[in-house]
Image (cartoon, rainbow, N blue to C red):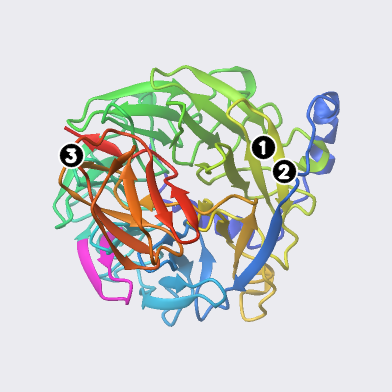
Amino acid sequence: MKTKKLSLHRAIFAFAARRPIRIGGLRSALVLSVICAIALVSASAQTFTSLAVFDQTNGLGPGGALVQALDGSFYGTTNSGGTNNGGLVYQWVPGGSPNPVYMFCKTKSCPTGADPQSALVLAPSGLLYGTAAGGANDNGGTVFKITPTGLFHLLYSFCAQVNCPDGQNLDTGLARATDNNFYGAAFNGGAYNHGSIFRITPAGQVTVVYSFCPQTNCLDGAAPGAPITQGANGNLYGTTAGGGTADFNGGTVFELTKSGTLTTLYSFCSQTNCSDGQRPFAKLLLASDGNFYGTTSSGGTNGGGTIFRITPQGTLTTLYKLCSLSNCADGFGSYSDLIQATDGKLYGVTNQGGANNYGTIFQITTAGTFTTLHSFAGADGANPVGALVQGTDGILYGTTGSGGLVTTCQPNLGGCGTVFSLDMGLSPFVKFVQPWGKVGSSVIIQGTNLTGSTSVTFNGTAASFTVVSATEITATVPTGAATGKVQVITPNGTLFSNIPFHVQQ
């Protein structure tokens, strides 16, 4: 059995381009027994704001999460729109409109790639690394790097050989690991045409780490549709949207060494009617408790997908089954990654469902307490696909794939998409471009209002530092530093890092 050569996000946007089908009437009979058991809670002290709209000229269909660059502004991609209608990379500054910095081609043979659909990755150099889902050789996709001002450099074009043994269709983004290389997933291609995991150096040298489906019925998984996560042990963890079960439909969670040894940790649809979830398309989140968290796009008791926790050893716990409320008021179908904010809670979005069936923003604790925070209504956005990101000001930011009511878009979209924020009242913090390093190495710290900072400490040990700008500090990992949080004292107060900095030996 061969996986169809399709683009995940293109399929999602095609589905979202029409108003999603009302599913409450079909599912209400299934969920009456659980309505009383699950509460849809409205969180307090929260403010949702629709901040900007896309208008096709500056992009259409943002799909990947925003990334905050060294200058404090945000960068993202759209899978369509722009001068060539082939998608683009844009900059967005809070208070303004998305500003294109690079336009891709539309043709399948576009040498730089086409239809970028995933989040960019910020490197210590200040460059942004990303993928384009198609274009180049046989519409195989590309890996590129780009400056914040739009200077583009092609690193690698996939499908460079017959039958695409290196991979094809890069619907997902890259992840930077502690070996300073990037790792990514190709949805198709590979030695068995069911996708691959690859490593690419900052200079563009590609090595295929693993090709899926050497096993009968693809019991090892097929069609990886999410970026890779590096675990505490240095191995790579991820999901596949297919394979894992004899009928090919479940998907998997896997662990992969950098030398290419794969272990299937869990196969979805292992339970009757896929009540444990089906077809995960989201990146695994390594949370502060040492476990991984993720979502499935379908399955669960009500078919709306699940939110799960899985240990590094493969023990899976279903925390919540979406569409557990009448008319799927709690959301339906999550394709995006979860994030852990500075309050320790997890945040995500659903593509459909909610009060208006345009998708939701939700919060869930690591213990499984679920809260719907916002239901999109169309004018404020619709059908979010990309993950949320927490800015250093403490606010959550995200995009929707359609909505916004811009009439220049295709008639059924109801708009080209939006940028929004959700303020949960969380305090500003600092974060690292690279949260690891040896004593004596230079570290970039990102934040807000850093001008005039008087102290930087690594887990209590003072460090020498330079304030580069209001949003950037460079510091030297001090002798005697141990793994732990970093503290920065500014004129406006003391800021702590959102995650520990790991001191390498």
Disc 2 from disc 3: Cα separation:
46 Å
Label located before the other in sequence (3 or 1): 1
The residue carrying mark 1 is 304
Amino acid bearing label 3: Thr
37 inside magenta stretch: no
Residue 12, percent from left and from top: 56, 54
Q: How many marks?
A: 3
Instruction: Determine the main secondary structure of the stretch shown in magenta.
Output: strand
Amino acid bearing label 2: Thr
Describe the element under mark 3 as helix, strand or loop: loop
Residue 7, percent from left and from top: 44, 53
The residue carrying mark 3 is 479
Instruction: In this rendered view, identify the residue nearer to me: 107 or 474.
Output: 474
Describe the element under mark 2 as helix, strand or loop: strand
Answer above or below: position of 267 versus 452.
above
Answer above or below: position of 254 versus 172.
above
Look at the numbered discs 1 and 2 and tell me whether their residues touch, using CB distance below 8 Å. no
148 inside magenta stretch: yes
The residue carrying mark 2 is 372
Answer above or below: position of 448 versus 363.
below
Residue 54 shown left or right of residue 162 in the figure = right
Q: Quadrant of residue 284?
A: top left
> Over which residues does the magenta segment extend?
141-155
Look at the numbered discs 2 and 3 and tell me whether their residues touch, using CB distance below 8 Å. no
Instruction: In this rendered view, identify the residue nearer to me: 234 or 159.
Output: 234
Pair 3/1: label in front: 3
